[in-house]
C-alpha cells in the first residue's frame, strides 16, 4: 500500500482545527473546490 495520494484522486476524510480552533472536516467542504497545500513548517519558503 502506498502512502502517496495521486493527483486528482479523492482525498481520504480527515478533520483539523481551523484558524479559530473549531474543527473543520473535509466532508464539510463536499461539493466545493478544495486545494490542500502542505509545507515543511512556518517561516520557510513554500
Image (cartoon, rainbow, N blue to C red):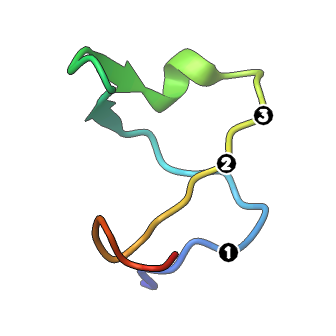
Left or right of 40, for residue 4: right
Q: Nearer the viewer, residue 42 or 22?
A: 42
Secondary structure of the residue carrying numbered label 1: loop
**Label 3 packing within 10 angstroms: few (<14), some (14-19), many (20+):** few
Q: Mark 1 points at which residue?
A: 6
Among the 4 quarters of the image, the one containing residue 31: top right
Q: Say which quadrant the N terminus sits in.
A: bottom left
CA separation, marks 2 and 3?
A: 7 Å
Residue at left offset 52%, top offset 75%: 46
Q: Which of marks 1 and 3 is in front?
A: 3
Label located before the other in sequence (1 or 3): 1
Label located before the other in sequence (2 or 1): 1
Farthest residue, direction left: 21
Q: Name the residue under label 3.
A: 33
Q: Which of marks 2 and 1 is in front?
A: 2
**Label 1 packing within 10 angstroms: few (<14), some (14-19), many (20+):** few
Q: Is residue 23 above or below residue 12?
A: above
Secondary structure of the residue carrying numbered label 3: loop
Residue at left offset 37%, top offset 22%: 24
Circles 2 and 1, Cβ within 8 Å, touching? The answer is no
Circles 2 and 3, Cβ within 8 Å, touching? The answer is yes
**For residue 35, which numbered disc appears in the image?**
2
- How far from the left and from the top, in percent, is residue 11? 57, 51
Residue at left offset 76%, top offset 24%: 32
Q: Nearer the viewer, residue 40 or 3?
A: 40
CA separation, marks 1 and 3?
A: 17 Å
Secondary structure of the residue carrying numbered label 2: loop
CA separation, marks 2 and 1?
A: 14 Å
- How far from the left and from the top, in percent, is residue 45? 47, 79
Amino acid at each position: 500500500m502506498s502512502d502517496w495520494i495521486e493527483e486528482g484522486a479523492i482525498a481520504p476524510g480527515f478533520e483539523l482545527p481551523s484558524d479559530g480552533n473549531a474543527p473543520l472536516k473535509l466532508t464539510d467542504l463536499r461539493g466545493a473546490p478544495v486545494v490542500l497545500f502542505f509545507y515543511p513548517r512556518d517561516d520557510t519558503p513554500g
